[in-house]
Image (spheres, rainbow, N blue to C red):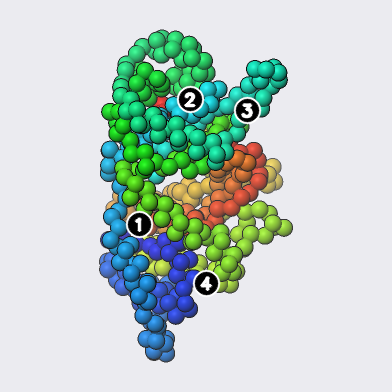
């Protein structure tokens, strides 16, 4: 049995309720019931919770019952169907991919100078990256700065999208040779598409057309016509920045994010989920509830756990240990830093050095803050001669890992991620990473996406 963890958003939502409910929600006997469902090892865990005292049980008996409104809200939430995903609904995936193409067509209709790059679907919708070059004023001949999209621009783009959808243009697939694709791209002056074409290694090259009005390199899939898109279930959300090819020395693109669903009711349900998420924003609740803080004097992005937050963290960690120990795992600990040669041997340095912090010189040798736990555990495993009869080894660690992860927006911040990483094989996900993401201005931001085919 896989142990189910309480999400951080749920934990924080419980904190904003009455003290009685908070204690009732975190009551150890609830944890005990969950863990009891999994096979236990014969040895009793040293981390087991102690049973509730009689005084605590008497006090919990006084916890007030849910109000009528709370009961109604709970029933309404239960009645809402689960939103579909790209993985379980191919029609939804087609809607999102075709919506991305329609949006790109609309952008170039409204702003002809815009150049398109990539536009894939994502978990809750899609995005498209655009480059806006400097232009010349036709009357004065003066250079006009590159356009920066605003919320007002998104309204214009959405209006143009609705018109395209209403015209019900057919969406057709065409196979062309690499030479023909290159000729067409050069004809319309889209340099980014040439780079995308070079990155496509398969042949023939597939192109999708919206009527005879617009086309793009793409592998599909798509709806049959623009009229098949539910325009009232599509919403443009925001604009962010992204460097082309993730290279800070290349062009800064403008990324338009959007969400798309099969019907308006699903969009309404999704927007409701976003509103609920805002209420449980850990950055707001952490400060409001005096759980943790980020002290700028110590450095941006470094988390200081206050007494209340530390108590919650200890409870979560104890639950994690109990869950793992109950399923036969041993808890281990490893250093936070190691010689750079270890990371070269493991392959981390060659493949992920852009996401790792710079090395530290110690007595004429270079050391690296660990981005992952696994190389340490490999060293521990090979510390002695072992047999296949010893397998499987089940080791788990609440190890702090250090990774440089950049999230780009306009203006572009960069971020430091310091989180608790669980070593594979593991039965539960990391539980503290979401609340350890903060701004940390260290070096220029980049976009780690690797644009290739638009469906990538």
Query: Under tag 2, what secondary structure?
Result: helix
Above or below: residue 303 compared with residue 379? below
Task: Decide which of tag 4 and tag 3 comes sooner along the chain.
Answer: 3
> Pointer 2: what residue?
109
* Residue 218 pos. (x, y %): 37, 25
Task: Decide which of tag 1 and tag 3 comes sooner along the chain.
Answer: 3
Give the residue displayed 55% in from the left and 53% down from the top.
437
Query: Under tag 3, what secondary structure?
Result: loop
Above or below: residue 318 compared with residue 299? below
Is the residue marked by circle 1 packed among few (<14), some (14-19), or many (20+) residues within 10 Å? some
- Placement of the N terminus among the 4 image quadrants: bottom left
> Pointer 1: what residue?
427
Residue 334 shows in the view: no
Is the residue marked by circle 3 packed among few (<14), some (14-19), or many (20+) residues within 10 Å? few
Distance between the alpha carbons at the discs numbered 1 and 3: 50 Å
Q: Is 152 or 273 nearer to us in this picture? A: 152
> Pointer 4: what residue?
311
Residue 159 shows in the view: yes
Mark sitting on residue 146: 3
């Amino acid at each position: 049995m896989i142990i189910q963890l309480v999400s951080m958003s749920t934990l924080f939502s419980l904190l904003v309720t009455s003290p009685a409910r908070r204690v009732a929600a975190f009551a150890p006997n609830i944890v005990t019931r969950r863990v009891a469902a999994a096979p236990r090892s014969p040895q009793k865990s040293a981390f087991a919770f102690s049973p509730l005292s009689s005084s605590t049980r008497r006090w919990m008996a006084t916890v007030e019952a849910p109000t009528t409104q709370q009961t109604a809200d709970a029933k309404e939430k239960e009645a809402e169907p689960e939103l579909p995903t790209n993985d379980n609904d191919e029609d939804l995936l087609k809607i999102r991919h075709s919506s991305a193409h329609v949006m790109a067509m609309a952008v170039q209709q409204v702003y002809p100078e815009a150049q398109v790059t990539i536009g894939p679907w994502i978990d809750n919708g899609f995005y498209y990256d655009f480059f806006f070059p400097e232009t010349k004023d036709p009357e004065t001949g003066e250079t006009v700065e590159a356009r920066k999209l605003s919320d007002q621009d998104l309204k214009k783009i959405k209006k143009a999208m609705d018109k395209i959808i209403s015209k019900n243009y057919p969406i057709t697939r065409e196979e062309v040779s690499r030479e023909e694709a290159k000729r067409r791209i050069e004809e319309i002056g889209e340099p980014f598409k040439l780079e995308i074409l070079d990155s496509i290694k398969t042949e023939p090259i597939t192109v999708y057309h919206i009527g005879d009005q617009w086309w793009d390199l793409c592998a599909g899939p798509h709806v049959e016509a623009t009229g098949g898109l539910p325009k009232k279930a599509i919403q443009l959300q925001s604009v962010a920045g992204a460097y082309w090819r993730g290279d800070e020395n290349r062009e800064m693109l403008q990324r338009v994010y959007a969400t798309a669903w099969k019907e308006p009711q699903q969009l309404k349900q999704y927007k409701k989920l976003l509103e609920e998420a805002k209420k449980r924003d850990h950055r707001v609740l952490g400060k409001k509830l005096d759980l943790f803080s980020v002290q700028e004097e110590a450095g941006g992005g470094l988390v200081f756990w206050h007494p209340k937050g530390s108590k919650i963290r200890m409870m979560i960690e104890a639950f994690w240990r109990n869950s793992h120990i109950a399923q036969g795992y041993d808890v281990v600990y490893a250093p936070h830093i190691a010689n750079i040669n270890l990371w070269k041997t493991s392959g981390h340095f060659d493949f992920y050095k852009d996401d790792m912090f710079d090395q530290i010189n110690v007595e004429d040798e270079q050391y690296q803050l660990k981005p992952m736990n696994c190389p340490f555990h490999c060293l521990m495993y090979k510390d002695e001669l072992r047999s296949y009869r010893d397998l499987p080894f089940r080791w788990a660690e609440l190890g702090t890992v250090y990774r440089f992860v950049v999230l780009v927006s306009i203006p572009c911040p960069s971020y430091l991620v310091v989180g608790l990483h669980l070593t594979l094989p593991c039965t539960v996900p990391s539980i503290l990473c979401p609340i350890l993401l903060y701004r940390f201005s260290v070096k220029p931001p980049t976009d780690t996406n690797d644009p290739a085919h638009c469906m990538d």
